Amino acid sequence: MHSLKYFSKVSIAAAILVFVVLAVGCIDAVDPDIITVSTSTTALPAVQALIDAYMDNHTFADIQTKYYGSGAVVTAVSFGISDIGMISRDLAPSEKEGHIFKESVICHDGIAIIAHPSNTVDALTLADLKDTYQGKITNWEKLGGADEQIVLVGFNSASGTRTTFNKMVLHNEDASETMLEYNANGAVQRIVANTPGAIGYVSLGYATDSKVKSFTVEGIAPSVTTVTDRTYPISRPIIMITNGEPTGLAKDFVEFILSVDGKKTLANHGFAPA
Amino acid sequence: MSYMDNTTKKRVLREGVIKSIWLATALISAVAVAFILGHVICTALSGFLFNTNWNPTGTPPSYGIAALIIDTLLVTLGALIFSVPLGLATAVYISYVAPPRMRDVVKPVIELLAGIPSVVYGFFGMIVLGSFLQKALNIPSGACWLAASIILGIMALPTIISVSEDALFAIPKDYKEASLSLGVTYWHTISHVLLPAAASGVSAAVILGMGRAIGETMAVMMIAGNAAIIPNPIWNVLSPVRTLTATLGIEMTEVATNSMHYYALFGVATILLLITLLINLTSYWLIKRMQTGSCLPDRMRNWTHSEGMRVAVAAVAGIIVVWFLSAVLGILSAVVITAAIGAWYFGREKISPKFAEKSSFGIIYACTAAVILILAIILWDIFANGLPAISWEFLTGRPKQCGLAGGIFTAIVGTLQLVAGAILITLPIGIGAAIYFTEYSHENLLTRALRIGNDLLNGTPSIVFGLFGFAFFVIYLNWGTCMLAGQICLAFMILPTIIRTTEEALKSVPNSLREASLGLGATQWQTIRKVVLPSAAPGILTGAILSVGRAAGETAPIMFTAVVFSKRFITRDVFDPVMALPYHLFALSTTVPDVTTQHYGTAVVLIALVIAIYLAAIFSRRHFQKKLFR
């Protein structure tokens, strides 16, 4: 029965460990105030920066984030899974049915068309882009570049960025089936940065990096200025939604986002003012 | 025929014609029924099963999953081509070739390979393998079928190795001794006596490995490119592909609940479940055969022994291997390698048995070394890049700037909370079920059905648990994403392992102990509580620890149900969401563009946690084994 003694020792140790783990959460003396913000991946870095800034001044606030495509953000807010949602396209009429969303446009975002830095093409037209993403142009040579096969990179189907791109560039027609699909700006940007023949579309904030180059579209380079004055042709609003009037911490945080400090943070992340 | 005059002949002929006319009408009615039914079913399914266009957001949307099914099968096939030879060779090495000391090294290494969380494999595949393939093969993107197959092959290796090793171990010693005493070489004994005798078990190993590959979500989703197309041409291993599981992983959280797209995803999950069901039933049947001692059924044995069948199998296997090689290494080297294999195959009768043995053992050593090398490369890459990130601040801070700065304390504690909850839920249920199976019931229809059910639950892809948890707890019960939902999903996932290991442990308790206790007048429950359970405790403990390790590394079941991207404080309420290490690594590597030491640091902590748990299991098993044999 030696093993029995050993086993009881081990199981007591294990039980203590489990208990400690479960108890650790209760050590904090304060009861934190918790809300959840769901955001489309486009706005994630900016929203996270806003939350970091807010929480630095509010010791007991715990603002959790989840990221999805815009479609799922609307679902999360309408089911009460999240208190605040950030979406990178307009609310569809079907989504508004049965809910009273409070919407406010917090900023505007351009969709930059990016490629590998070694790419020699600088300018694209909307028509070029449409043909490229529909697989009618398959080689950079046709666009004035080197003889290199084009690798299309885009978003998965629930993305607000994809919805906007499909609407403004593809006129709601289907993109080529060979397009690689990812569900975040960061993933698209990294693939493009590592792939000499790639073309991708990302939120403006992800195009400032030197690892990728961005094209001018219809002669306009994407930047906060050109998105602000709406001369850059592919942009969309970032909309904050709550299910009805926000209360408590959510209300306070919403007010912070719309304040001068909040707007400054958004501008620092490459978003144009609303 | 001379007795049959002309008229008789005519009459016979006429009767024959008339008969065939009626037969034709009968056939027409049967064919018509079959055709109508077939057509109705085909039309009903054509939009779903036979349609290759998966485009749920197109106008009009299209929900064809044929491409997804084909891609899933292709990726799995590739993984098997990679892992079956390596796995079998390693299993043979461990069972027959390795000196005992080497066996003690190689076996834990294989177990460690099984312990690496799938999200870490995905991370490694995305960062290291993907860019390596891209540069080495000069292809536009490293995210492709080949990369996914290699990673899945590595992930299937431990399953293939351990199950076929069990099968080889189960072969009676007499076989080996009888063969050797006839004067044939050791290699001839292995290849012509022992391996064929273990055929059922080895095929079960391959099929279980296949199930592992088909059911994997996270790794595939991170490296396969996710374009829902059939590779063109179909052997183009450099084409991006999208599997059934990856579709669920990517789109499940992204769709509006109760939309057509939402239901289509559940359709995808149903197909996935059916495929894994088929796989599990096959392996169940094969293992059953192995346990009852029979090899393959006679008809199948004749079949595999016929010369024509062998040539056909060899030809098909050869063509498949040439596809792969030519895509990976170029046409020339593919031809050379194929020629070498062909020369060996046809010339092997002329080679001396000694030389054949030496060269075969050489190949087996090389394969085992390759498996160990793979593990070494993965661990070295992760630890070399990740250890610099480990600091006190990293381990105790909260994440800042989307995880690019700060620490992962909340994620570490969240993972521990999730597995602690899961084990608290499963342990009583699992041990209870196992006690019922071994102590209270005799083999009958009910227990057999329950046991098959348990095996099927064991083979269910982890993403399906997540899907179920999302639809039931998060949406239907309206709990929202919360810790409890994740704990329950993980608990369901590890339940079969707990039941099975507990059952094994209980069975290993000698009946004489039970009889002695009952003979002293103890009741059955007293016997179980005071005699059987304490003796079985070590086995139960080991099983529980292994399950905890598995749960700690899983991402798919908690991705939809329990986790958030960032969070400041530790979760105190089971109805609040948590952060978890595997999901944190996934989220960092897919949303945050730069690969930083923070990514690698998270991977290091995750691997260290899981490996520590596995080592605890290995040590406790060793400890008790020594005790038992003393």
Image (cartoon, rainbow, N blue to C red):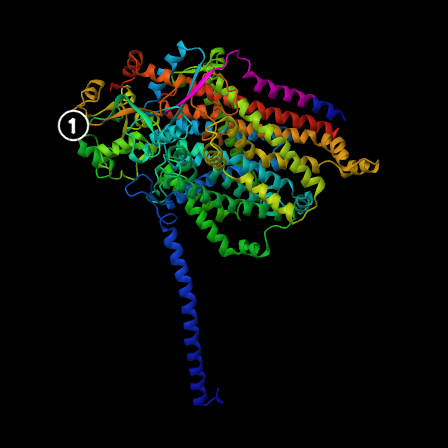
* Residue segment shown in magenta: A9-38
User: Which quadrant of the view contains residue B29?
Assistant: bottom left
The residue located at (42%, 64%) in the rendering is B33
- The vertical placement of B132 against A32, above or below, is below
- The vertical placement of B213 against B47, above or below, is above
The residue located at (69%, 45%) in the rendering is B174
- Residue that lies at the very extreme toward the left in this rendered image: A219
Amino acid type at mark 1: Glu
Q: Please count the marks in the image.
A: 1
- Residue that lies at the very extreme toward the right in this rendered image: B520
Q: Nearer the viewer, residue A23 or B268?
A: A23
Residue ID for mark 1: A218
Q: Is residue B89 visible?
A: no
The residue located at (49%, 55%) in the rendering is B309
Left or right: residue B515 compared with residue B287: right
Q: Nearer the viewer, residue B495 or B246?
A: B495
User: Which quadrant of the view contains residue B9?
Assistant: bottom left
The residue located at (50%, 41%) in the rendering is B211
Dot 1: element: loop
Q: Nearer the viewer, residue B203 or B279?
A: B279
A26 inside magenta stretch = yes
Q: Is residue B241 visible?
A: yes
Residue B600, position in %: x, y? 44, 20
